[in-house]
Amino acid sequence: MTSTKASRIGEEIWKTRVDKVNAELVTLTYGTIVAQLCNDYDGDYIEVNKQLDKMGYNIGMRLIEDFLAKSNTGRCANFRETADMISKVLAYLDELFFDEVRALSANQRV
């Protein structure tokens, strides 16, 4: 699959998702999760980091599964093909979000 086609697929999938979450809400939620993990593991920060890593991995897996289910890209033959497909679409999304952040920074909102 070409990079242009992957970009178009990424754009089509994400353009219908206009729901945005306030950054402060995300920060507070994440902070609450970390604080609760610290309490649950009695300040064992190594274990807290392991749990956060596991949570991040699971979130990433769900995002990738969601993308592949909605993109109709067909079945990938091997892991390399899967990684290539995801990297092309994520490169597009990275540019998209970078442009938004740069625009916010220009408006002195960040």
Image (cartoon, helix red, strand yellow):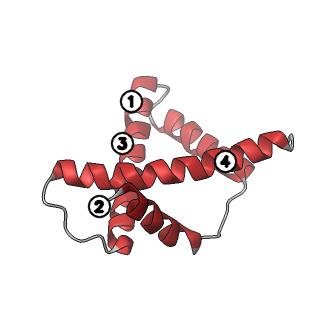
Question: Where does the N terminus fall, quadrant-wise?
Answer: bottom left
Q: Gap between marks 1 and 4, in whole Å?
A: 36 Å
Q: Give the answer, above or below, for where 8 lies relative to 41.
A: below
**Which residue position is annotated with label 1?**
47
Q: Are the residues tagged 4 and 3 within 8 Å (C-beta)?
A: no
**Which residue position is annotated with label 2?**
1
Q: Are the residues tagged 1 and 3 within 8 Å (C-beta)?
A: no
Image point 52% across, 33% down: which residue?
A: 38
Could you say whether the residue bearing mark 3 is in a helix, strand or loop?
A: helix
Q: Amino acid at mark 4?
A: Asp
Could you say whether the residue bearing mark 2 is in a helix, strand or loop?
A: loop
Crowd tier of the residue under label 3, counting other residues whose Cα lies within 10 Å: few below 14, some 14–19, many 20 or above: few
Q: Is residue 33 visible?
A: yes
Q: Gap between marks 1 and 2, in whole Å?
A: 41 Å
Image point 37% across, 48% down: which residue?
A: 87
Q: Are the residues tagged 1 and 4 within 8 Å (C-beta)?
A: no
**Which residue position is annotated with label 4?**
99
Could you say whether the residue bearing mark 1 is in a helix, strand or loop?
A: helix
The label number, if any, that marks residue 69 in the structure image: none
Q: Answer with mark 1 or mark 4, whichever residue precedes in sequence.
A: 1
Q: Give the answer, above or below, for where 50 lies relative to 8.
A: above
